[in-house]
Amino acid sequence: MPLDAITLAHLTGELDARLAGSRVDKIYMPDKNEAVLLLRAKEGNVRLLLCANQNGARLQITTAQRENPKVPPMLCMLLRKHLVGARLLSLIQEPLERVVRICFEVISELGDLERRELVLEMMGRSSNMILLDNGEAVLAALHYIDMSEGKSRQLIPGVRYRLPERPQKLDVCEGLDVLEQVAMSRDKTPCDKHLLASLMGLSPLLAREMAFLSCGFVDLPMSELDDEARTRLVHQLQALFTGEGSVPTLLVDAQGTPVDFSCIPITQYGALYQCETCPDYSVMLDRYFALRDAAARKKHKTQQLERLMKNATERISKKLSHQRAELTEFRDRDKYRIYGELLTAGLSRVPKGAAFVELPNYYEEDAPLLRIPLDVSKSPALNAQGYFKKYQKAKHGEQALKEQIEKGEQELAYLESVQLSLEQAETEAEISSIREELMQGGYLPRPKGEKQKKSAKGISEKPMRFCSTDGFTVLVGKNNTQNDMLVTKVGEKQDIWLHVLGCAGSHVLVQSGGRPVPDTTLEEAAQLAALFSKASPKEKVSVTYTQLRNVKKPSGAKPGYVVYFSSQTAYVTPPDGLVDRLAGEGPFGGEKEQPIEESRQ
């Protein structure tokens, strides 16, 4: 839901009490629509997030750490120039507007104290972030507005800042008596829609809740409200706008996932959702947006890669289909040799200009007549030579075509592994690693001016680390790059390597330390290999395993491709809770990400 003006008023007051007097230490913009101010406040170092995304505009203290771009946006550079080292004076919300002014005191180049303001407008698609100077003139903005765009205001550097145009609604700031005016309406409009259209500051959720608390329904027409319900409506609205009973509240579903938030307990959903009280509004927003923002960022960053994978897969599949059809024709090449030999033996019996000829086939018993198609524009001798050439072409082309089909199948399997790893990637670092892998493979063009990363330095994420029941370390790669690292850099010759047979999956490495690996550890490692693969975990999964000395990576092979010898096969079904039970601590970390990769025999 959008952050409504009433909830924003409580949030702004909370932030003002906590942050007034703090100093701006650093400024980052992890996303083009988000700025993070690192502040030295009374309670210690805090991160103040200003988000102007159309679907999640907000202002809050956050504990989440985000990966920052290598090159900061221009707005970030301007914010650093004007605000780093500044003292935060106050946070002020425009009355019943989703606009907050963050006021700073800075020292000018001449040593004078000056005022700067950072304005955050949280208005859906029109959300914006504007930096103002001492005279409220625009210094910089996330989105500039020119009069030629037909807007009601101009927002360009040097122009005095104006607030967005206010909607034609009643303002409670002018007096609480407007609430009675709204409640006494006899319109046939549903109660929640009437409140939303009449009063400043309400969100759809709060409008429905006010209607539900007053008459037990959210959409009962205003004309059907009795006097008692109207009285309750006035009292509920007064309590909402005066802050009586306000508390940061999360609505969670049966699985504990946040689905909405508010400044009051929400009762309209009955037993469908539960209310959870949060210690403050920033914690509430952090919890609500944690999963939502992560999913949105992943979708945004993976869209191009997913399109690339889909197009490449379709192209290679189509090419393989044509090659297999051509290979079928090549397998019938002997008929061309027979045609040529029969024509050569019976040239005198072939009339010129004939479209076909029937000659005895001495390669079959009783020598039945065989119809041989002819090119009417060529002589019988040239037709015979043409069939011999077709035979030789098919003979040599079959082997070349088999090699091409094998390469195509390997490439298709590689793309399948990359696609699966992309689907299961959860962090931005993992997505960046996949992007770098595709750029190194030539599937994705490298941005102009960007240098290729060295493989060792390009791995910001490390393999998952587990600890078996017997105390052995089990490493699971997250992507093709890490799978290669396990085989070529991390593992020792006596370590055990595992991989699911016949489908994409992670490389798993049991670090033996020179000790014999017991069957319990082998079984658990095989279960991890089955779990982190494309194989269905509900069925018996075939997992091959061997010592790492038997695993080789061919020179020039694609990432994640290996060959292995002298292996054994285990059939396992991963039990529930395996990852939590074996999650370990150590130099590779215990993150529970899901890497995917493809290896082939």
Image: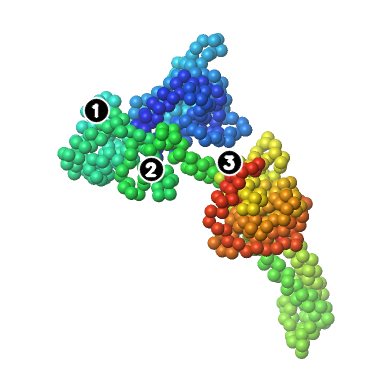
The residue sitting at 60% across, 62% down in the picture is 572
- Give the amino acid type for the residue marked by disc 1 in the picture: Leu
For marks 3 and 2, give the one nearer the viewer.
2
In the figure, is residue 435 to the left or right of 224? right
Q: Tag 3's secondary structure?
A: helix
Query: What residue is shown with label 1?
Result: 176
Picture disc at residue 251 = 2
> Where residue 71 appears, x then y in whole percent?
61, 31
> Where residue 582 appears, x then y in whole percent?
59, 50
Asked whether residue 315 is in view, the answer is no
> Where residue 107 appears, x then y in whole percent?
53, 14
Q: Residue 284, located in which quarter of the rendered image?
A: top left
Q: CA distance from mark 2 to mark 1?
A: 29 Å
Relative to the observer, which residue lies in front, 23 or 315?
A: 23
- Give the amino acid type for the residue marked by disc 3 in the picture: Glu
Query: What residue is shown with label 3?
Result: 428
Q: Residues within 10 Å of mark 3 (few under 14, many from 20)?
A: some
In the figure, is residue 189 to the left or right of 469? left
The residue sitting at 29% across, 36% down in the picture is 197
- Tell which circle, 3 or 2, labels the residue nearer the N-terminal end: 2
Q: Tag 2's secondary structure?
A: strand
Picture disc at residue 236 = none
The residue sitting at 70% across, 39% down in the picture is 457
- Tell which circle, 2 or 1, labels the residue nearer the N-terminal end: 1
CB-based contact (under 8 Å), mark 2 and mark 1:
no
